[in-house]
Amino acid sequence: MNAQPPYPRPAYAWYCLAIFCFAYLFGFMDRIIVGLLTPAIQADIGLSDSQMGMIQGIAFALFYTLFGLPIGRATDRFSRKWLLTIGTTVWSLMTAGAGLVRSFGGLFVMRAGVGIGETTLNPCATSFIGDAFRPETRPKAFGIFSMSTALGVGLTYLGGGMVIGFIGGPTGGNTFPMPLLGEIPAWQAVFILVGLGGLVPALLIAFTVREPARRELAGGKRQASWTEVRAFIKQHRTTLFCHHVGVACILLAVYGWVNWLPALFVRLHGWTIPQFSIWYGIFGGTAGIISAVSSGFVTSWLKRKGYVDGAMRTVLIGGIGLTIGTGLAPLLPTPELVLAGYCIASLFTNFPTSQPLAAIAEITPNQLRGFITATYTMVIGIAGAGFGPWVMGVVTDKVFGDPMKIHYSIALVTITMGLIGITLIGYGLKSYRRSLEQADWQQS
């Protein structure tokens, strides 16, 4: 076995992770801010639920997918620091650009740009974390990394609700004076402010993060050929299929209800956007942070108990908790109970988002890690971020035919896709253990 280069100092590794979390926070805010602004956008430019579902999901996911595999390949060959710097800059500018357009086509194009930029995030971060942290620390590092999604949700709803309430009135429909632009609708101002904020982590990555040495290289080779890529995928096809598709089914439901929850509270319960945003931002965001941090500890605890497949068992636990909790929550009779149901279920939200990345790092050698992460990102991008919001919008429009039955569409899609996802993950545990046994390149 080849000698491994030394790991970065722990304090510096955690600093780099904090910067990536900062970027991920803005990335996730950029993904879900459109859901928060949906009622105001629809009131202003008259888009249907199906159109908003496409802007929330498919516009982002289509280009997220198209650029995913080339970016994953580039991650294994070039500087992850600079790829992520460019990606963060692109998605931030495109989010700001959404505040400059007033049509379905314009919003679709800008959301597509967000998808292109965010393609860099998971492959670069997964590969970088694998080289910066020792194997026994990685589950916790990936848990902290995924905590950014919880912070993103909390800050988007809490901060977005406050901003909309301040600059847009109770419905978020007023105008706001912006330098050089004059009076623009409040929802456009929110896009601009959030997008420009994302340039801060881009600058920090560019000027304060150093590229770590690559380690855990199968056969000591720095780069893998396409033949080796195909051979790895073929050898681990059952593991990768159950991992990728199982998680994607669960995330389809998660991305769907995250984007449509504001509309549910506005339509069924008469809440304003600021009212919902502030309450869900406080309690849902806190639950998500607890979920992200605890996910790594759950994986480590399972491994100490002898479960070598601890990372994927954590994903399974999270999928079960989410499917039960968020499948029942929208059907509860009062807004307070619905909110409580989602907040309790959010204690599981980041189990199936953080630990799949830890699982990839466990079974994949370094020179394939970016590409395999990109295949995972591609699948969850199509099924989760892409079709989740759109499917729920279509089910509301076409199956129930009534925007006031949005709670039924959320529950139906959540339970159906959640059951498929947890079935696949449970079935794949055996093959995942076999893939771990074959990872003889690992060095501690």
Image (spheres, rainbow, N blue to C red):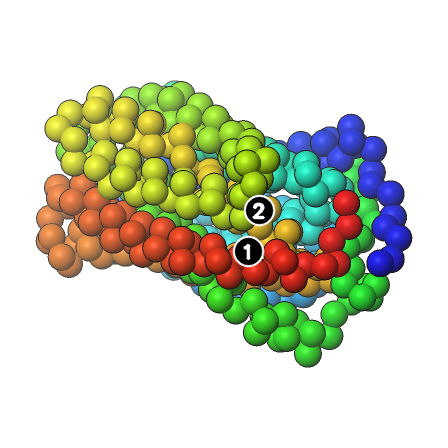
Instruction: Inspect the image, locate mark 2, and give the three-letter code of the amino acid beneath it.
Output: Val
**Observer able to see residue 385:** no
Residue 6 point in image, percent of width and height: 87, 43
- Residue behind mark 2: 308
> With 211 as the anchor, is 242 left or right in this view?
left
The quadrant in which the N terminus is found is bottom right
Residue depicted at x 22% and y 22%: 336
In this view, 125 is above or below 301: below
Residue depicted at x 73% and y 75%: 225
**Observer able to see residue 360:** yes
Q: Nearer the viewer, residue 318 or 189?
A: 318
Q: Secondary structure at mark 2?
A: loop
In this view, 31 is above or below 242: above
Q: Nearer the viewer, residue 334 or 174?
A: 334
- Residue behind mark 1: 433
Q: Earlier in the sequence, mark 1 or mark 2?
A: 2
Labelled pair 1, 2 in contact (Cβ < 8 Å): yes
Residue depicted at x 46% and y 38%: 350
**Residue extending furthest front?**
306
Q: Nearer the viewer, residue 153 or 309?
A: 309
In this view, 295 is above or below 418: above
Instruction: Inspect the image, locate mark 1, and give the three-letter code of the amino acid beneath it.
Output: Arg
Q: Secondary structure at mark 1?
A: helix
| Mark 1–mark 2 distance (CA, rounded to whole Å) | 7 Å
Mark linked to residue 276? none
Residue 151 point in image, percent of width and height: 50, 30
> With 260 as the anchor, is 444 left or right in this view?
right
The quadrant in which the C terminus is found is top right
Residue 285 point in image, percent of width and height: 43, 27
Residue 158 point in image, percent of width and height: 41, 24
